[in-house]
Amino acid sequence: MDLEKLRELFQLLLEHLPLGVIVTDTEGDIVFVNQSAEKIRNAKRQNLIGHNIHACHPPSSLEKVDRAIDSLKSSPNYVYHRMVEDHINNKFYTNTYVSLYNQDNLFDGMAVITEDVTEKRESDSKRALFAQMQEETIRNIQTQYHSLLITAMESVSSLLEAKDIYTKDHSKRVAEISTKLYEYKYSMDSEMLDIKAAAFLHDIGKICIPDSILKKNTVLSEEEYSVVKNHSAIAADILEPFDQGHKISTIVKHHHERYDGKGYPDGLSGDAIPLGSRIIAIADSFDAMNSDRPYRNAIPYEKCISEIISQSGKQFDPEWVLIFCEMSRTGSL
């Protein structure tokens, strides 16, 4: 078979794959789009070919896209996966990014292979919710309190954020990062839903901390810091009466434990710290550093990542630091 015939067959294969395929050149300009990519992304190839890969992403995602492209350019034969939510078309995709290098080992472009996982994700979500309902089915009236807990505590959490502008949306971002980390390794299940709820409610105990401490624009005194450190135990006390099995309250209570055992409130270490607490600890610290605070401006993104890495095995679980860095490096966070 001559080379030209082989190219024709390869082109035909790409065109009829059930997966979406987009290929770019070295500058990220799109040179090929198959029909599945048109269907999945609800876009015509003539409106994509010749345009930069940035055209496939909203402006808010461009920083993450650039990080992903830089990662591909610097890593020959590198392949990674990323879950993408398409808010315009209400879809979820799994994108596989492949760096393309020529025979001289020079970067020659990249391919983005897209699978529409909207139905699968919805199915996984329903199974996770069903599993959670089964696990929480108990013999007394407390069964009904779980959903009441979330609704009531989210309201209290909103009140907390309303009185402190510097924590506004912090819990929402921590919940988003935490669930992305968990789903990256374990996929969606009932434990992920518990972690999401715990992440959203992790600072609920600060409702009992005086504003004079929460809003202080200078470094806290040792005594003031001791007061703040009570917030995780206070949160657990608030949540426990409604939290059958204490799954969520336990995660919240221990989200300030350290992997080396020097955290609070109980000085737990290593795997003795609940999985959800170890994940939330990283998400919480990253967002706290990357956000404005009364006593300082937001810390630059790369410096936040460096600080997370420096605390691997100390403050944070090394396994989850690696996952966090991988997702950050490829633009998934």
Image (cartoon, grey):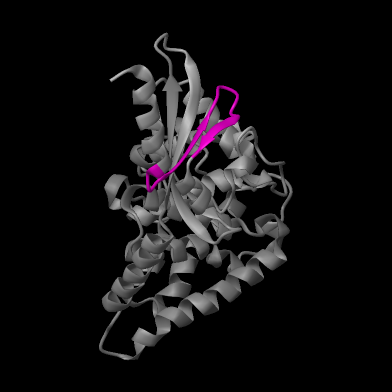
Split into 4 quadrants, where in the image is the N terminus? top left
User: Is residue 307 shown to the viewer in this render?
Assistant: no
Q: Is residue 98 left or right of residue 297?
A: left
Most foreground residue, 14 or 161: 14
Occupied quadrant, residue 226: bottom right
Q: Which residue is drawn at 36% across and 43% down?
A: 259
Most foreground residue, 196 or 228: 196
Q: Is residue 182 left or right of residue 72?
A: left
Occupied quadrant, residue 123: bottom left
The stretch of residues the image draws in magenta is 16-33
Residue 99: image location, x then y, percent: 44, 26
Most foreground residue, 233 or 37: 37
Residue 21: image location, x then y, percent: 45, 40
Residue 37: image location, x then y, percent: 49, 46
Q: In this view, does 66 lie to the left or right of 250?
A: right
Most extreme residue toward the top, as rendered? 104
Q: Residue at x 33, y 62 (%)?
A: 189
User: Is residue 254 shown to the viewer in this render?
Assistant: yes
- Residue 55 lies in the magenta-colored region: no
Residue 210: image location, x then y, percent: 66, 64
Occupied quadrant, residue 227: bottom right
Figure check: 127 above or below 317: below
Number of residue marks: 0
Most extreme residue toward the bottom, as rendered? 141
Figure check: 90 above or below 221: below
Figure check: 34 above or below 247: above
- Residue 19 lies in the magenta-colored region: yes
